[in-house]
Every structure is written in C-alpha cells, then in structure tokens.
Image (spheres, helix red, strand yellow):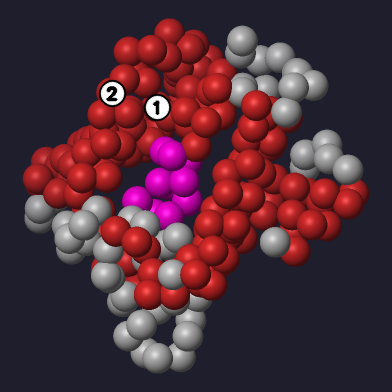
Amino acid sequence: TPQFQSSIPVYSKVSTWLLLLPLLFFSANGSFSFTTRITDSVSAQNSHLTQTAEGIRPLVIVFYLFMLILFFVGYRVAWRGFVNNPLVVAPLVWCALSVTWSASPILSFRSTIELGMSTFFAVYLYEAFSTESLMDLWMFVGTVAAVTSLALVVFLPQYGIMQISGLGEWRGITNHKNALGVNMAYLLTPVLFARVRPWFRVIYSCL
C-alpha cells in the first residue's frame, strides 16, 4: 500500500525483492562486473550507450522488459506523481527536443527513452513508498551491493578486482573502481536520514 509507515522489515516485503534487481542495476551503472570485461573509465561510465559491454546486452533487455511490465502495473501511481510535479518532465522534454539538433539523433533518441524509464521509475518509487520506506529500501540495496562486492573481491577476484593494471583495485559488482566508489558513497547517504538503531548505523556505514 503506497505512502504508509510500517513496522514490517523492508526485506520481508515482496515488492522489495522485485525491485532489488533493477535498483542494483542502477547502482552498477547498468553494467555488472561479472557480465563485462570493461576496465577503462570512459567505457565503464557509458557502456550502456556505446554498446561496448559485450555481455551486458541480455541484462539490459531484461531491464527494459521489467520497466515495461512496471509501466503497465504502476502507471496510475506514477501518473499521480507527474500530475503533482509536472516540472519533473522538463528534462525529459528537453532531451527529446535535442534529437532535432543532435550530431547523433539515434543515440539521443535512445538516451531519451532511457531517461524516460528512469524518470518513470523514480516517480513511481516516490509515490509508492513513504520517505522512511524508501530509506529502508535503499539501505537494503546498499547492504546487498556491499556484501556482494566483498564476496566477489574475496571469492571471485577475476570479477571483483580490476585486472588490467595489476594494482588490485576493487570494483565489486560495478565494472570500474570509480563507479564502485561513487555508487557506494551514494548508497551510504540513506543511513544519515533513516530511523535506525545507532549500532546498525555504524555497521552499515563501516560495511
């Protein structure tokens, strides 16, 4: 049920597990380390656009299908958010207009579609969950991302550690060490606002 506080742990809710994969997908910049061999920063940050990630395409297709299903399931919830906050579509409109003067119209059109999906997803989350529930959801995603990253580093270093330089930089579930650093810093922020016990705040931050 949208917009209500609940004492039920977020990890015990079906909706949380259904949203986990797409949220991890965003947390990894759309390219997991175990599905691509990309190691340079430019490709790592733009692989979903440049199509340089050889093994990531099936995962992107799955993500597209998920967003399509979510649209039909949650369009009424998201529509309420767009009506209440019409300016949220302004960047999307500007992106769509840029197709007319872009040096690469096809790439710009694809970016518009991806921005549209991301915008819809963000508005849906905002409308479907209370603020506190969103904080709990992001901490759950952060916990899974951190634990999985550490597991890859320790048990599957060929995926969790960058191999190109030989310096042992951790990249975890992402395809580049810089992406891991930025995204983990982002996933750290919910613990500053969520209503959690101090001991959990410390453990989560250290993790």
Q: Is residue 23 magenta?
A: yes
Tell which of 102 and 68 is nearer to you: 68
Residue 50 position by quadrant: bottom left
Left or right side of 123 for 150: right
Which segment is the magenta one? Answer: 21-30
Q: Is residue 13 visible?
A: yes
Residue 140 position by quadrant: top right
Query: Going 66% across and 44% down the picture, which residue do you hit?
Result: 139
> Callout 1: helix, strand or loop?
helix
Q: Which mark is residue 120?
A: 1
Q: Which mark is residue 98?
A: none
User: Mark 1, residues whose alpha carbon is within 10 Å: few (<14), some, or many (≥20)?
Assistant: many
Find the residue positioned furthest to the right: 198
> Callout 2: helix, strand or loop?
helix
> What residue type is disc 1 on?
Phe
- Which residue lies under the disc numbered 2? 68
Tell which of 90 and 68 is nearer to you: 68
> What residue type is disc 2 on?
Leu
Q: Position of residue 175 (x, y in %)?
A: 37, 66
Rendered view: 91 above or below 27: above
Query: Going 32% across and 66% down the picture, which residue do you hit?
Result: 44
Considering the whole magenta stretch, tell me its main secondary structure.
helix
